[in-house]
């Protein structure tokens, strides 16, 4: 959070300075595309069906099933991130009301827990994972909504109780607590503990974080951090169950720990995991993890060499929404730390395909796991009924992914603004000399690749505008006030000049439709499939409009590209539809995200070859 860093800067500088920082609250407003998804989610989920009172009640009466106490914190943190974006007073009131309802459940030892004091810490119940989410929900409220000292006091009470109950001998080791085989989920409390350290500068929190990272290694019997530092591939980290979501959540905490300690060993561990996830796990739609062939018993929530196995016909569950959203958040941290444009490419890939492709058209939830071929969406997984609403971890995390899009779309460096996502937007920011600067992004991207950025500084000033040139955009045109500028795929184009009011940047991204050959997994199923990607958009065949959706085809392609023709969508809920030439005549393909599988219709993303 920029606010957190600014707050820190007033007191004591962090050991590591980020390359990019997020813009302040409400600085960015989207004016199209993702805005529709964000509004739909806020209206129908955060301000719609979320049973806040039912979530709080579990802290009085106990959980119905393990880890249920995570629900409150997850619902509140996405609401707080949305509030950061919208400043909507009605949303603020909903959040304020549930936060004070929750504070009323504090137990005599100052814990806010679904477990009675005598049962704490409650390993199989998921008590520490739940208390972590209480801390994250309260922290997000404190940072984004209202700096009420009572909220900070409750966070300190919650954290201090955890420090009293778990830790080095003779206390209970934190890695002895949890429900999964290596208890990795309990160690993820690292992130809110580090956030609390940043807020309070109280050494005991940093000591506790050091204990989790340097003494316990994040999990029982496995040093997750050293495995990553040693370049162990994700599917091999942590033993029998390399749980994707929790592992990345642990590393979100490690990023905060690295920022404060400045120990490059941890930076290496973070970057190794990040690169290995990209190489081994991330599929064509930007998410990862699966059940086949390596982890058939764990519901598709484990790392699984999924990038290589994504066409495996045995796959039944893959790409949990919690995994995609946590990947997006981890990428946003890597982007801030390193300024690596690949991290923004990864965010874009997931946002336009996996994330919005998992959202219910009604806005009140997300798919749990997601398929590339077959019935795309499947809401069944961990969760249960709360006040007659079916709540899952993924329903709770999906909105957090959407709330991160304005947070990452435009950032700033010391030299000037950084444009990461080309969603239409208006941003009010400041120049390196602290003068007002307005940015306007006008575009119908990703329908076309034409983007106009208007730069409106209050006064002439020299600074640098960074424009992300996606790795897939091979033939790019970048023009500033009519003069061409170098633009290389997979880099930021850095435009340094004296900027004046009325200056314009015109970007033409390479929207040619690319043929992607499937990777070869363990059963070489990839030999039989190809897919099409246009700009950031994965195309798919949709059973809703095409009975032959999964029939083998031979694409008409040249040099790895297919000439596709935009056409009026057959279904009114489709974002984009194209006519695609094949040797057997043209077929209709639409953007993956638009395909509606909620009533059982199927999708075909990896096209079988004839
Ligand atoms: Zn989930």
Image (tube, rainbow, N blue to C red):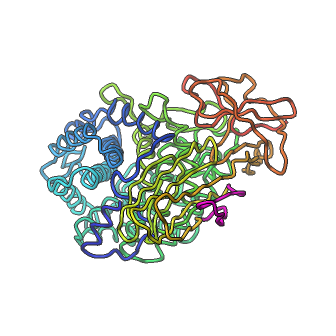
Q: Position of residue 174 (x, y in %)?
A: 33, 60
Residue in view at x 64 percent, y 40 percent: 315
Q: Nearer the viewer, residue 593 or 253?
A: 593
Q: Position of residue 198 (x, y in %)?
A: 28, 67
Q: Position of residue 157 (x, y in %)?
A: 18, 57
Q: Is residue 125 among what the camera can see?
A: no
Relative to 584, residue 535 above or below:
below
Q: In the rendered picture of this protein, how many numbered marks are placed on residues? A: 0
Q: Write the start and end of the magenta stretch as one range.
A: 473-491
Q: Is residue 373 left or right of residue 186?
A: right
Residue in view at x 65 percent, y 52 percent: 508
Residue in view at x 68 percent, y 55 percent: 472
Q: Position of residue 125 (x, y in %)?
A: 33, 45
**244 magenta-colored:** no
**478 magenta-colored:** yes
| Quarter that holds the C terminus | top right
Q: Residue 566's image quarter?
A: top right
Q: Nearer the viewer, residue 285 or 575?
A: 575
Q: Nearer the viewer, residue 349 or 268?
A: 349
Relative to 375, residue 342 above or below:
below
Relative to 426, residue 264 above or below:
below
């Amino acid at each position: 959070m920029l606010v957190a860093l600014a707050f820190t800067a007033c007191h004591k500088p962090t050991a590591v300075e980020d390359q990019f920082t997020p813009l302040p609250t409400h600085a960015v407003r989207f004016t199209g595309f993702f805005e529709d998804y964000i509004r739909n989610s806020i209206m129908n989920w955060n301000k719609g069906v979320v049973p806040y009172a039912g979530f709080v009640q579990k802290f009085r009466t106990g959980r119905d099933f393990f880890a249920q106490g995570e629900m409150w914190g997850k619902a509140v943190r996405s609401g707080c991130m949305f509030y950061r974006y919208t400043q909507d007073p009605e949303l603020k009131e909903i959040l304020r009301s549930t936060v004070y309802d929750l504070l009323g459940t504090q137990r005599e030892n100052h814990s806010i827990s679904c477990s009675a004091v005598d049962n704490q810490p409650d390993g199989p119940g998921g008590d520490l994972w739940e208390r972590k989410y209480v801390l994250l929900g309260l922290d997000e409220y404190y940072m984004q909504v209202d700096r009420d000292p009572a909220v900070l006091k409750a966070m300190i009470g919650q954290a201090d109780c955890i420090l009293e109950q778990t830790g080095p001998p003779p206390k209970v080791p934190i890695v002895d607590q949890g429900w999964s085989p290596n208890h990795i989920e309990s160690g993820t409390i690292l992130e809110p503990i580090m956030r609390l350290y940043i807020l309070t500068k109280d050494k005991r929190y940093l000591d506790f974080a050091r204990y989790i990272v340097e003494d316990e290694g994040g999990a029982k019997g496995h040093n997750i951090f050293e495995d990553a530092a040693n370049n162990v591939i994700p599917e091999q980290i942590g033993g029998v169950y390399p749980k994707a979501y929790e592992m990345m959540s642990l590393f979100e905490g490690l990023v905060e720990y690295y920022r404060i300690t400045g120990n490059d060993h941890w930076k290496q561990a973070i970057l190794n995991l990040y690169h290995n996830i990209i190489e081994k796990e991330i599929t064509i739609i930007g998410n990862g993890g699966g059940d086949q062939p390596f982890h058939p018993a764990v519901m598709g929530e484990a790392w699984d060499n999924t990038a290589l196995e994504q066409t495996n016909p045995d796959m039944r569950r893959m790409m949990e929404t919690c995994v995609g959203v946590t990947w997006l958040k981890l990428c946003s941290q890597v982007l801030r730390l390193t300024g690596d444009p690949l991290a923004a490419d990864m965010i874009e890939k997931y946002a336009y395909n996996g994330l919005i492709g998992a959202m219910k058209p009604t806005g009140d939830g997300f798919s749990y796991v997601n398929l590339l071929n077959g019935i795309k969406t499947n809401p069944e997984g961990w969760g249960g009924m709360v006040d007659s609403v079916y709540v899952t971890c993924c329903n709770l995390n999906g909105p957090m992914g959407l709330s991160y899009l304005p947070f990452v779309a435009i950032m700033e460096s010391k030299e000037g603004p950084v444009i990461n996502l080309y969603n239409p937007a208006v941003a009010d920011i400041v120049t390196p000399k602290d003068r007002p600067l307005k940015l306007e992004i006008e575009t119908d991207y990703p329908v076309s690749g034409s983007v106009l950025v208007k730069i409106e500084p209050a006064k002439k000033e020299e600074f640098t505008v960074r424009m992300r040139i996606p790795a897939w955009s091979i033939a790019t045109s970048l023009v500033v006030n009519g003069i061409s500028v170098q633009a290389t795929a997979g880099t930021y184009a850095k435009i340094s000049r004296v900027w004046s009011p009325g200056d314009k940047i015109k970007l033409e991204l390479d929207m040619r439709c690319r043929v992607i050959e499937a990777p070869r997994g363990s059963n070489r199923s990839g030999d039989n499939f190809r897919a099409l990607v246009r700009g950031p958009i994965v195309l798919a065949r949709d059973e809703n409009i095409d009975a032959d959706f999964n029939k083998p085809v031979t694409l008409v392609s040249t040099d790895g590209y297919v000439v596709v023709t935009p056409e009026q969508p057959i279904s009114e809920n489709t974002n984009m539809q194209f006519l695609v030439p094949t040797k057997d005549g043209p077929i209709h393909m639409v953007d993956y995200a638009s395909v509606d599988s909620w009533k059982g219709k199927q999708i075909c993303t990896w096209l079988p070859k004839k």
